[in-house]
Amino acid sequence: MKIETKLVHAGEPRPRIAGAITLPVFQSSTYEAREELDYHDVRYARLNNTPNHIALHEKLAALENAEAALVTASGMAAITTSVLTVLGQGDHVLAQDCLYGGTHDFFSRDLADFGIEHDFIDATDPESWPAKCQPTTRAIYVETMTNPTLQVADLRAVVAFARERGLASMIDNTFATPINFRPAELGFDLSLHSGTKYLNGHSDIVAGAVIGRRPLLERVKRRLDHLGATLDPHACFLLHRGLKSLALRIRQQNDSAQRLAERLERHPAIDRVNYPGLASHAGHARARELFDGCGGMLSFELAGGSRAAHGFVRALRLAIFAPSLGGPETLVTLPALTSHAGLAPEARARLGITDALVRVSVGIESFDDLAQDVEHALERAQ
Ligand code: PLP
């Protein structure tokens, strides 16, 4: 089946429950026990095994052509549970240096409390990785496209390096989604998602997913059963409903972001546009080789500096100044003030996050209306 068909049909119960075309919400915390079972097989909502969980697990695994999947209470629950499964006391992990803020903080502030060490790496420069590797290194962790400059790591080299050294390869695939990139096809062991974003796609739930090799997924599930960061059945239902339109939404977002990036690149009020679909982006060749589309996220730097960036967001009439991403509405943020406010100014400068940088999560509105709103706000920002 093609991915559009899998979105609709993979994982759906056969026969359909009471003939229902849409899988109903099983709003039951516990289930009748028919026989003596292992603790992890008891039907109980925290153990991630209600009919709503099972259908989602099958659908998500099918979408990335992976062996298994698991939904979690948030993207951070997917990340922390997976990291705390793959790594234990005395272990070391290599992580990309420009990760999503919450993940970056988890690595730099929390992991030491579990006896786990880390080193940040430039994920576009494989030659620099061996020097950072230690005898205790067990995993390498990257994102498909990073926030907010859309850096594209050398993903083939990450998988090869992990294989050579027996490390687990982990990737946050939130920005790409299975429509644009399927990590298991390249050989990644675990793909992680904030389902809050594109997978659900409606800005109305918080959710996460772990997708990958079955033996690893079984270990992640056991840890999740104990940590308890389970996605509740009603949120499962909403995620399931949102997923069915993923391909339609992502293709529109790929297209609108590409067109907007091209238009912004020619605009005199703009110094630089970060979008992997542009030939001027450092990750362009890699994105074209590996991805089926470059996604709905882009960022740009205003020539007028911080004042112009603030003026721009104030002048928007359609796009909304708000955190998060991946929903139907276009959302705009100033990363230096929001997602990356916790970083020292020098660290932000090193990552290309200036006070004049604006990040856009392109929604599914008409491109013409969106482009008009952005161009109007740019005029007003001068
Ligand atoms: N990964 C990425 C790339 C994100 O952008 C986010 C949230 O913004 C997360 C993970 C965390 O997801 P959640 O907010 O669902 O916990």
Image (cartoon, grey):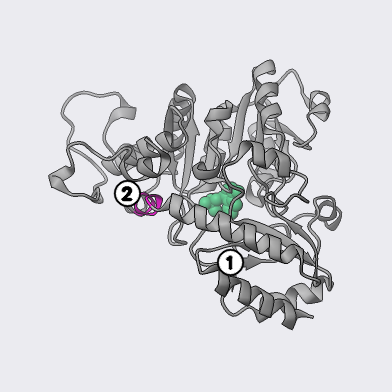
Image: magenta residue range: 238-244
> Could you say which quadrant of the image residue 7 lies in?
top left
User: Which image quarter holds the C terminus?
Assistant: bottom right
* On screen, residue 246 above or below 130: below
* On screen, residue 304 above or below 279: below
- Provide residue 194's location: percent of width, then percent of height: 52, 48
The dot on residue 18 is none
Which residue is located at x 24 percent, y 38 percent?
Answer: 13
Residue holding disc 1: 331
| Residue placed most toward the observer, 363 or 57 | 363
Farthest right residue in view: 346
Residue 68 as seen in the image, left or right of residue 41: right
**SS class of the residue under badge 1?**
strand
Residue holding disc 2: 233
User: Which image quarter holds the N terminus?
Assistant: top left
Amino acid bearing label 2: Pro
- Provide residue 264's location: percent of width, then percent of height: 72, 66
**SS class of the residue under badge 2?**
helix
The answer to whether the beta carbon of the residue marked 1 is less than 8 Å from any atom of ligand 1 is no
Instruction: Judge the density around disc 1: few (<14), some (14-19), many (≥20) Cα neighbours within 10 Å.
Output: many
Residue 42 as seen in the image, left or right of residue 128: left
Q: CA distance from mark 1 to mark 2?
A: 28 Å
Instruction: Judge the density around disc 2: few (<14), some (14-19), many (≥20) Cα neighbours within 10 Å.
Output: many
Which residue is located at x 84 percent, y 70 percent?
Answer: 303
- In this view, the mark in front (1 or 2): 1
Specify the principal SS of the magenta part. helix
Farthest left residue in view: 18
- Provide residue 67's location: percent of width, then percent of height: 43, 27
Residue 229 as seen in the image, left or right of residue 186: left
Is there any visible trace of residue 77 in the rendered image? no
- Provide residue 124's location: percent of width, then percent of height: 77, 37
